[in-house]
Image (cartoon, helix red, strand yellow):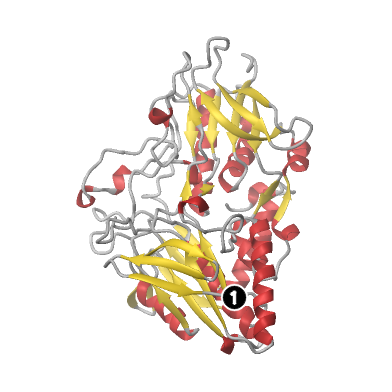
Amino acid sequence: MATLDKKQIVILGAGISGHTAARYLLRGRPKTRTPYEVVVISPNEAWNWIPSNIWVGVGQMTKEQVTFDLATLYARVGIPFHRARAVSIHPEGDADHATPFVTVEYTGGAKVGQTAKVPYDYLINATGPKLNFGATEGLGPDHGHTVSVCTADHAIEANHKLQATIDAMRRGEAKTIVIGTGHGTCTCQGAAFEYIYNVDHVLREAGVRDRARMVWISNEYELGDFGMGGVHIERGGYITNGKVFAESLMVERDIEWITRAAVNKVEAGKLHYEQLDGTRGELDFDFAMLIPPFSGVGLKAFDKAGEDITAKIFAPSGFMKVDGDYTPRPYAEWSAKDWPSTYQNPTYGNLFAVGIAFAPPHLISKPMTSVNGTPINPAPPRTGMPSAAMAIAVAESIRDMLDGAPAPTRTASMAKMGAACVASTGRNFFTGSAATMTVFPVVPDYEKYPEYGRDLSLTFGEIGLAGHWMKAMLHYTFIYQAKMKLGWSLLPD
């Protein structure tokens, strides 16, 4: 178990937020009076720069270009690594152990299939989401009829099927390509948004775009919502909403769209959907990439007596409760102040959750249901820059708490931070492009910015070749940084 002379900080998950927390805890170790060890637990053997999976999914990058081996890196920098899946959290220990611990099941190596108890003094839940393909019948690459770009392996399969579709079009066949969200409560529209434009780009490069009908389907109320309640941007001195910005991109590329839609069933070559007004539709397809809804990974929690306290620690979605205000209230009473800032669990002060692992207090987009009672609204995005900012704040708070701070010292509220998104719309050094957008704050604050909820001097969008160069630069910069190569700490997150 953890010893008194060296504290143990355990991180569940090694994605963007978990790996960022590990890096900053490692960097901060010489600055603290209290010695500690950082331990990372992840079921995955590789770190994946997920934003570039869309390029793997169109055959313009390889898996090796977007991943690297975690065990090798952590061995080099002195971080113990367990390739294992977290099963349950015991924040009070149990009858035999006074120290809190997490139970894990090994998913690789010599211990595969075995379980163990890993003690902790502080625990950071950065597990990310479960890709809940099962929420929609027939969705997903494993047991369904659609592909995905959520993992590097999924993206490889997506590219194989896309290339087969392109080959058929080269033979003169007409094809229908559908890309978007596969459920009424999906988040991460951005990944699908990037993918549809990159598919359009490679079809044009292959000379077969005229044989493809391309359709975007989404649970957004309007194009450009992205789970953020829409956005207004300043371009050329004019205020433009995200709907106009996104629709113009679709029109320019001859892409059809269906919004306010919940895909509720997928069969081979056909998807079924429902819209807010109750309309039910069918859409035939030859190739479909649909993002699944996210849920918590299924962690359980138990008290010292072994009683199940999962509902006390986690929201019904499976995401961990933190310092947000989860009081049920009507939409009109929601506030930016409801959003968490320290990501500390209110019951156990040594327990934190960052990135997609924390439970949002409410949606950002207005909650809506169809006339048939089906929820059709995007879930809040919690990836990219915000997840890294949360991880850094939590890592530095824990470091300070080890040295005696009574409470977290750093904050990273999504209602007080901005985010920049560089969305690829085609990868090519000369003919590529990307939509570059900044939003401040991520969660709109209508008390501070009553007209649009955001500071328009810090919220803008452009599209062009320079954006592609920036996207490419960020790819190599962040992978260099994640590998903790020389000077990594000087690079921005």
The number of callouts visible is: 1
Image quadrant holding the N terminus, namely top right
Residue 337 position in % (x across, y down): 30, 44
Residue 183 position in % (x across, y down): 43, 58
Q: Residue furthest top?
A: 96
> Circle 1 sits in a helix, a strand or a loop, which is it?
helix
- Asked whether residue 267 appears in the rendered view, the answer is yes
The residue beneath circle 1 is 199
In this rendering, the answer to whether 331 lies above or below 276 is above
**Quarter of image, res 56:** bottom right
Q: Residues within 10 Å of mark 1 (few under 14, many from 20)?
A: many
Amino acid on which disc 1 is placed: Val
Left or right of 235? Residue 329 is left
Residue found at x 65% / y 89%: 172
Residue 178 position in % (x across, y down): 51, 73
- Asked whether residue 191 appears in the rendered view, the answer is no
Residue 179 position in % (x across, y down): 51, 70
Left or right of 155? Residue 253 is left
**Quarter of image, res 174:** bottom right
In this rendering, the answer to whether 286 lies above or below 190 is below
Residue found at x 52% / y 30%: 398
Q: Nearer the viewer, residue 292 or 456?
A: 292
Residue found at x 75% / y 58%: 64
Q: Nearer the viewer, residue 391 or 178?
A: 178
Q: Nearer the viewer, residue 144 or 3?
A: 144
In this rendering, the answer to whether 36 lies above or below 329 is above
Left or right of 7? Residue 407 is left
